Image: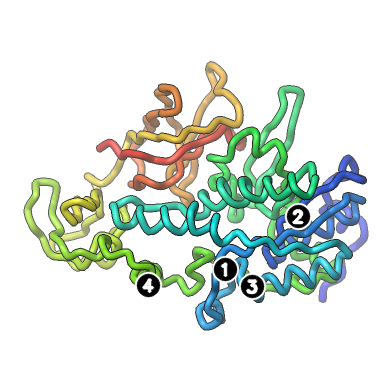
Amino acid sequence: MTHYSETYIQSLKPDLSHLKGVRVVAAMSGGVDSSVVAALLKEAGADVLGVFLNVWEYDRKDVAGHGSCCSLDDAYDARRVCDQVGMPFYNMDMRENFRRDVIDPFIADYESGRTPNPCERCNRFVKFGALLDAADKLEAEYVATGHYVQRRDDAHGLRIYKGNDDKKDQSYFLATTSRQQAQRVLFPVGHLQKNGTRILAQHYGLMTAHKHESQDICFIPAGDRIAFLKREGAKAGFRTGDIVDREGHILGRHEGIAHYTLGQRKGLGLPDGPWHVVGLDGVTARVMVAPPEDALIQEVDVGELVWLREVQSGEALTAKVRYQMKPAACTLRINGRHVSIIFAEPQKPTAPGQVAAFYVGDELLGGGIISKVVR
C-alpha cells in the first residue's frame, strides 16, 4: 500500500471545524464515499449519526459481481464502518417511499414512452426528502452525503457547484433539489478526485477503501432493465407495434416501446440506416425514427422547475439535458414553473422524463424535468 505524507493527507480534508458539536446525519450507502464522509465528520468533532436507507429487496445473485447500493451486504458494510468510526448506526425502512416515489414512476414512464431518471427522483424524494424528515426526528441539523458536488455559500447565501472530479460530478442529479432541502445538506468529499477519497479511506483504515462501486441503476444491479420491467408487470410497455419514419412509413416491427429510448441508435435492426429513435408513443405503441441529421434538437420544454438561486441579467447560461453531455450555451424562456431551453447549437437528442440542469460556469442554478422535446 502506498504511504502518503501527513501534509498531503491533511490537504485532502475539508475544513469541517464549524460542525464541532453539531448533530449531523451521515447518509450511509455502504460505499467508500459515504464511509469517508462519516470518518471526516467524526474527526471534526461532529455529533454524527450513521443512517442507512433500506429501499429495496435485493436478490443476492443479481448483486453478485455487479456492485450495488443499499443491498443487505451494503447495510452490513455501513454498520461495520459506523463501528469502525465509533458512531451510532440506524437502519431505516424506506421501501414504501422508494416504491411510491421511484419504482412506480419508473415503470409508468417506460410504459408511456418517457425515459425516467430514477437517481434524480431518489435524491429528490428519498435522500433529500424522507431522509431529511428522519433527520428532524433525530434532531440533526444537517444531512451529509457522499455526492461529488460542492457547496460554497457566500454573502448571498447557498451556492452549489460541480464536483471537482469531472468524471464523478453529480450536480446534474441534484438539479431538482429544492433550495430549502439543499440548505441542510453537506457534501464533504465534493472537492476531491475519486482517488483522493480512496486515499482518505485507506488513511482511516476503512473496510470499504477498495470496494467496487456499481455503475448501474441501484435496483437493477445486473443492468437488465427489460427483465426488471417484465418482472414488475409493465405490460403496456411490451405491446408490439410499428417502427415508422417521420412521414409515417412503416420500416419494421418492435416488441414494445420499453425496449427503446429517445436518441437510441443501436439495436434497431432497420434497413437504409443509420437511424435514431426520435419518438415513442405509449398510446399507439409506435416507435418513430429519423436519420441522424434530423434527430438533433434545439429546443426543450421543462416542467417541475426548481431554482437554487435566481438567474441574474446578463449571465451566460448553459444547460445539460443528458448526464453525459457537456453543458451547452442556451437561453431560457421562463413562464412560472415552466421553461423552454433554446440551445445556441443543435444537440444530440434527449427524452421526456430526463433532467435539465442549468449552470453559470460551474455553479448549478437549478433545473427541472423535460416534458417535451421540440423538433
Circle 4 residue: 231
Any mark on residue 214, and which?
Answer: 1
Q: Residue 164, can we see it?
A: no
Q: Are marks 3 and 1 in contact (CB under 8 Å)?
A: yes
| 185, 171: nearer the viewer | 185
Circle 2 residue: 26
Q: Work out how far the residue at label 4 is from the one at label 1, CA to CA, in angstroms.
A: 21 Å
Circle 3 residue: 212
Of mark 4 and mark 1, the one earlier in the sequence is 1
Q: Residue drawn at (18%, 60%), measured in percent from left and top?
A: 273
Of mark 4 and mark 2, the one earlier in the sequence is 2
| Mark 4 vs mark 3: in front | 4
Q: Are marks 2 and 3 in contact (CB under 8 Å)?
A: no
Q: Work out how far the residue at label 2 is from the one at label 3, CA to CA, in angstroms.
A: 20 Å
| 326, 29: nearer the viewer | 29
Q: Work out how far the residue at label 4 is from the one at label 2, CA to CA, in angstroms.
A: 33 Å
Question: Is 213 positioned to the left or the right of 24 in the image?
Answer: left
